[in-house]
Image (cartoon, coloured by chain):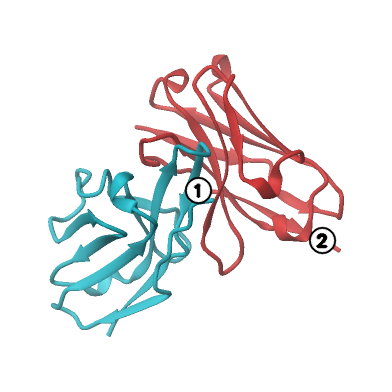
Chain colours: A cyan, B red
Amino acid sequence: SYVLTQPPSVSVAPGKTARLTCGGNNIETKSVHWYQQKAGQAPVVVIFYDSDRPSGIPERFSGSNSGNTATLTISRVEAGDEADYYCQVYNNTSDHVVFGGGTKLTVL
Amino acid sequence: EVQLVESGGGLVQPGGSLRLSCVASGFTFSGYWMSWVRQAPGKGLEWVANIEQDGREKYYVDSVKGRFTVSRDNAKNSLYLEMNNLRAEDTAVYYCARDGGLSPFDYWGQGTQVTFSS
């Protein structure tokens, strides 16, 4: 089965840049989606198909995917960005959806 | 406005059963894959099952195969999850989400809680 690996936590000061990684075997061949989940709320997609941004998501959120690592970059981090972030792919070998374990972003 | 509203969660005993429902509105339900995603207390997201537009193709995470059945009624804009032989590790918030194929989960319900009672 396909495994996505995310660091459990990332901390960043306000105004700085946060880079959240998602590792997977040859992940660049898959489309990666990223979700933000704030405490007590349902997840919200913030980046889809590696680097597309839904309407309503700030331009500060961007994504990339290369080799074995996909990255969600949050520029000029704000206190309101504090949340859990999950990467997700569709494994068409097994027809299964796979989530990473999630990264808790803490704004210092 | 797209809305997904889950119901059917509750307290369950070992080996018990529950049927979760999700009513969709604001979009053409029959045109989309639909999925169930769960989240155990303090844990991450786990995809449970998905179903294609006409209900013929269904896929499950290995841990629920043979115990859970996903289905849909396009005439009622409804998605279901029949859960049998429930185990303690099935305790979670269960979300209904739109898509679950190659496209992202672009809409989610607010979730319904399934709690294991000993």
The x and y percentages for residue B81 are 66, 36
Foreground residue among B62 and A72: B62
For the point 39% across and 77% down, which residue is it?
A: A9
Locate residue B115: give its quadrant.
Answer: bottom right
Q: Which mark is residue B117?
A: 2
Q: Pinpoint the chain carrying mark 2.
A: B
| Residue type at the position of mark 2 | Ser
Locate residue A75: give its quadrant.
Answer: bottom left
Tell whether A14 sits left or right of A105. left
Q: What residue does disc 1 label? A: B110
For the point 19% across and 43% down, which residue is it?
A: A55
Tell whether A11 sits left or right of B76. left
Q: Which structural element holds mark 2?
A: loop
Crowd tier of the residue under label 2, counting other residues whose Cα lies within 10 Å: few below 14, some 14–19, many 20 or above: few
Foreground residue among A28 and A102: A28
| Residue type at the position of mark 1 | Gln
Is A12 rendered above or below residue A49?
A: below
Q: CA distance from mark 1 to mark 2?
A: 22 Å
